[in-house]
Amino acid sequence: MWLDLARAHPAGVGGVDAGPSAVTGKRSARSALPVEFLGNPRTYTVARLQDEFGYAAVAAAIHLPLIAEQRRNHVGQILAELTRDGATDSLPWIIGGDLNEDQSAPAWQILEAHANLATPLKPSFPAHNAHRVIDAIFATRGVAVLQGEAVALDPADLKAATDHLPVWADLQLPAQSN
């Protein structure tokens, strides 16, 4: 998941991405999700990102399992961590990745009940003949989705690199109240 978090600051509009060059402070944790015995291991990563101007967000990268009940349970577990003990009360959060289901399924609907869809409903899977919308990014209310520029990526490189086409969002974070 690639995030380009834009925000207004004294120098104008700038960008913060999940890469190390623009992020001045970050803390992250990787957590395991429960699966059946000998099941395909699943994890998610939650990171608190902050730029040099003090704009901050909590971002979670997820890869949900193929089993529908596990997807629903895993989304619940991830949302519980994001909202536990008011951890994100003052910060916007962004969550995205491979949901392994479309917008009509339960895990997707749970995410949409807590956040806004920040990516277009565009097929991303499989990369060689994308016809399923199973990858998405969601952002909490207050985070504005900006009209980003199309990124020219070589289709042959994408098909060789992964079984999913990339999704991304250009987001504007709200000013933080101190």
Image (tube, grey):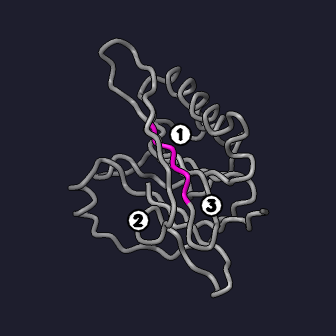
| Spot occupied by residue 42 in the image (x, y as percentages of width and height) | 39, 30
Circle 2 — which element? loop
- The magenta stretch spans residue 60: no
Horizontal relation, residue 89 to residue 147: left or right: right
> Pointer 1: residues within 10 angstroms few (<14), some, or many (20+)?
some
Mark 1 or 2, nearer chain start: 2
Question: Would you say the residues marked 2 and 3 are in contact, meaning their CB atoms lie under 8 Å apart?
Answer: no
Q: CA distance from mark 1 to mark 2?
A: 32 Å
The residue at the point 73 percent across, 39 percent down is: 86
The numbered disc on residue 56 is 3
Amino acid identity at mark 2: Pro
Discs 1/3, front: 3
Task: State the CA–CA distance, disc 1 to disc 3.
Answer: 29 Å
| Labels 1 and 3: the sequence-earlier one | 3
Mark 2 = which residue? 20
Mark 2: give few (<14), some (14-19) or many (20+) Cα within 10 Å.
few
Q: Residue at x 41, y 73 (%)?
A: 151
Q: Position of residue 37 (x, y in %)?
A: 34, 12
The kind of secondary structure element at disc 3 is strand
Q: Which residues are magenta?
A: 44-49
The spot of residue 146 in percent (x, y) is: 63, 70
Tell me the quarter of the image containing the N terminus: bottom left
Neighbourhood count class around disc 3 (C-alpha, 10 Å): few under 14, some 14–19, many 20 upward: many
Which residue carries the number 1 mark? 102
Q: Position of residue 98 (x, y in %)?
A: 44, 43
Q: Main secondary structure of the magenta part?
A: strand
Q: Distance of mark 2 from mark 3, alpha carbons?
A: 14 Å
Nearest the viewer among 110 and 52 is 52
Label whose residue precedes the other's in the sequence (2 or 3): 2
Q: From this view, report whether residue 129 is shown above or below residue 44.
A: below
